[in-house]
Amino acid sequence: MRKNFFVLASFILVLVTVFSCDDDDNLNNGNDNQIVLTTENNLYEGDLYTLYLEREITNTENAIAEFQFYIDNNQGTPEIELQLEEAEQQLGTLNTNLAIQMGIEAEYVLPPRVPRRPPNPPNPPSPCIGCVPLAGSFSFITITPDIVNLNIRILDFSTEEEVETVVFNSFNPAENYNGVVSIQPASLNNFTGQVILIIEREDINGDTTSYSLNANFY
């Protein structure tokens, strides 16, 4: 009888161990498969990069117009002519990068995400000059397969205190979205107001880009 008791106890212990391991595996490996991305909870980094490129293109076009104005009115100098040439080259690079980003969005069927330009954003508080309005209700940040490393720091504009930091050390495809996005949790913890986004990204070709963006989360 005692022998049978020890055999039964050992069997129960094995079962408990097996099911505990299965539960741990499910917690560690199944999280992404349970996530449902929506237009409220998914902030796609590619949209932030696009907003940055569009802003830089506008600024560069304005600089080119100013340099050209001086030259056309016989106020040009060798320095201004050099600045004009450099600005035109920069504009070409920016437009190329924007076209590449638009191609990436066209290539992948992306899941629902926060609109890049919200339809009815509130008026930003003064002095939020040049900041981009963004919905701050997101719970996740996503990247596409062209990005292998990403670091996003969100800083309070007034205090420069860190509101949130999100890091992707690799692209880990979410199975329930056909492998076109990698997902990381992120939250502003009910923070609203003006922030500075500092972003470092590395693509599959090993090219790195660092950029910043002023935003107003509402």
Image: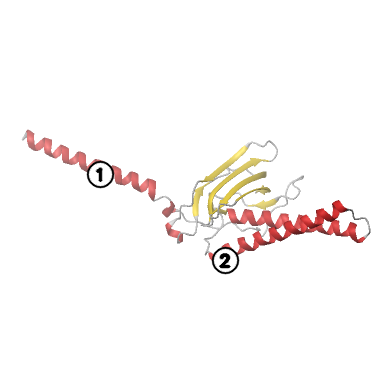
Q: Residue furthest left?
A: 1
Image quadrant in which the N terminus is located: top left
Give left or right: position of 104 versus 61: left
| Three-letter code, disc 2 | Ala
For the residues labelled 1 and 2, the Cα–Cα distance comes to: 45 Å
Residue 9: horizontal and vertical position, in percent? 16, 37
Residue at the limit of the structure toward the right, as seen here: 74
Residue 198: percent from left, percent from top: 64, 45
Per the image, label 1 sits on a secondary structure element best described as helix
Query: Of 110 and 59, which appears nearest the observer?
Result: 59
Name which of mark 1 and mark 2 comes first in the sequence. 1
Q: How many marks?
A: 2
Residue visible at 7% across and 35% down? 3
Amino acid under disc 1: Val
Circle 2 sits in a helix, a strand or a loop, which is it?
helix
Q: Which of the 4 image quadrants contains residue 101?
A: bottom right
Residue in the foreground of this view, choosing between 185 and 48: 48
Circle 2 sits on which residue?
106
Residue at screen point 13% across, 39% down = 8
Q: Pointer 1: what residue? A: 18
Q: Residues within 10 Å of mark 2 (few under 14, many from 20)?
A: few
Q: Is residue 184 left or right of residue 33?
A: right
Please tell me which residue lies in front, 129 or 119. 129
Residue shown at 19% from the left, 40% from the top: 12
Asked whether residue 137 appears in the rendered view, the answer is no
Look at the picture and state if 31 lies above or below 112: above
Left or right: residue 6 compared with residue 176: left
Q: Position of residue 60 (x, y in %)?
A: 77, 56
**Where's residue 218, x and y in %?**
65, 49
